[in-house]
Amino acid sequence: MNRGFNAIIEAAVHTTRYLRNHDPELGWLVRHHLVLVRKCGGEKEREAGGLLRD
């Protein structure tokens, strides 16, 4: 467990909520967590972040 892995989990949760109601605040949270993934995550976390982003 590391900060990048935790950020992937948070981004995934916010993404599923964002897809249901398109709340701009949730979109901001997804982008925030994906930045953390790029900074703190390993290769697998970055790959997962790319999937969420797409």
Image: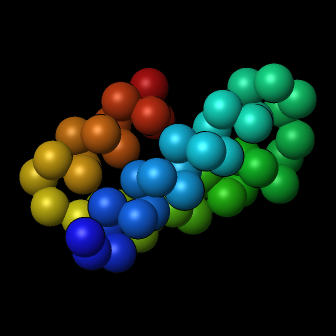
In this rendering, position of residue 41 left or right of residue 28: left
Q: Toward the viewer: 3 or 22?
A: 3
Residue 20 appears at what percent x and percent y? Answer: 81, 24
- Answer above or below: position of 26 versus 5: above
Residue 42, picture quadrant = bottom left
- Determine the residue positioned at 60% across, 51% down: 30
Count of picture labels: 0
In this rendering, position of residue 39 left or right of residue 16: left
Quadrant assignment for the C terminus: top left
Quadrant assignment for the N terminus: bottom left
Q: Can residue 31 be seen in this view?
A: yes
- Answer above or below: position of 17 versus 20: below
In this rendering, position of residue 39 left or right of residue 19: left
- Answer above or below: position of 1 versus 54: below
- Determine the residue positioned at 67% across, 58% down: 29
Q: Toward the viewer: 1 or 36?
A: 1
- Answer above or below: position of 32 versus 47: below
In this rendering, position of residue 49 left or right of residue 20: left
Q: Is residue 40 visible?
A: no
Residue 50, picture quadrant = top left
Residue 39 appears at what percent x and percent y? Answer: 29, 72
Residue 40 appears at what percent x and percent y? Answer: 27, 73
